Image (cartoon, rainbow, N blue to C red):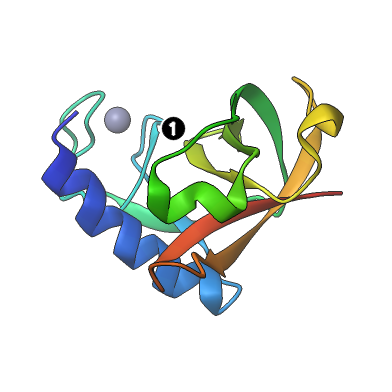
Amino acid sequence: MNPKVRDEGYDDLLDAAEEGEAYYLACANGHGSLPPRRTCPHCGSVDLSEESLPDSGTVETYTTTQVAAPSFASKTPYTTAVVDFGPVRLTGIVRADAEDVEVGMRVGLAVGRNTMTGNRMLTFHPR
Ligand SMILES: [Zn+2]
């Protein structure tokens, strides 16, 4: 995956998620992808429509970081998860105690802020 494209899409997604209107892009073949795609990464279709993201997804995999870089030191341990929202998968920080996170856990999407850097990030909240 091209990290530059992913970052641009991430910002678009954060903007939408902050408004409670997170979306993904869907092609006629039912493939999902994240903005700002112009073509479907799965089949090359250029006919993409914006579809509302389901308001919850399930944890597919997760990693708990016990020791982080200095800018994250006050946040450890924290858990990063890949969450399956059906057509698309998103990566973010789970706002739950690390020991409570498990594969299959149902979470909702929100936008949080890294208190150290001020950067926005996707966060997942247990449902
Ligand atoms: Zn497609």
Identified by mark 1, the residue type is Gly
**Residue bearing mark 1:** 30
Image height of 49 relative to 68, above or below: below
Residue 56 image point, x, y percent: 73, 47
Q: Is residue 17 left or right of residue 62?
A: left
Residue visible at 52% across and 68% down in the picture: 17
Which quarter of the rendered image does ligand 1 occupy?
A: top left
Vertical order, 45 against 8 (above or below):
above
- Residue positioned 44% across, 32% down in the render: 30
Is 100 drawn above or below residue 74 in the view shown? above
Quarter of the image that includes the N terminus: top left
Q: 66 or 102: which is nearer to us?
A: 66
- Classify residue 74 by image quadrant: bottom right
x, y percent for residue 73:
51, 48
Please provide percent x and percent y for residue 120.
Answer: 43, 67
For label 1, being within 8 Å of ligand 1 is answered: yes
**Foreground: 92 or 87?**
92
Q: Is residue 98 visible?
A: yes
Of residues 1 and 30, which is closer to you in this image? 1
**From the viewer's perspective, is 41 left or right of 102?**
left
In the depicted structure, whether residue 122 falls above or below residue 96: below
Q: Position of residue 7 (x, y in %)?
A: 23, 52
Q: Residue at x 86, y 32 (%)?
A: 100
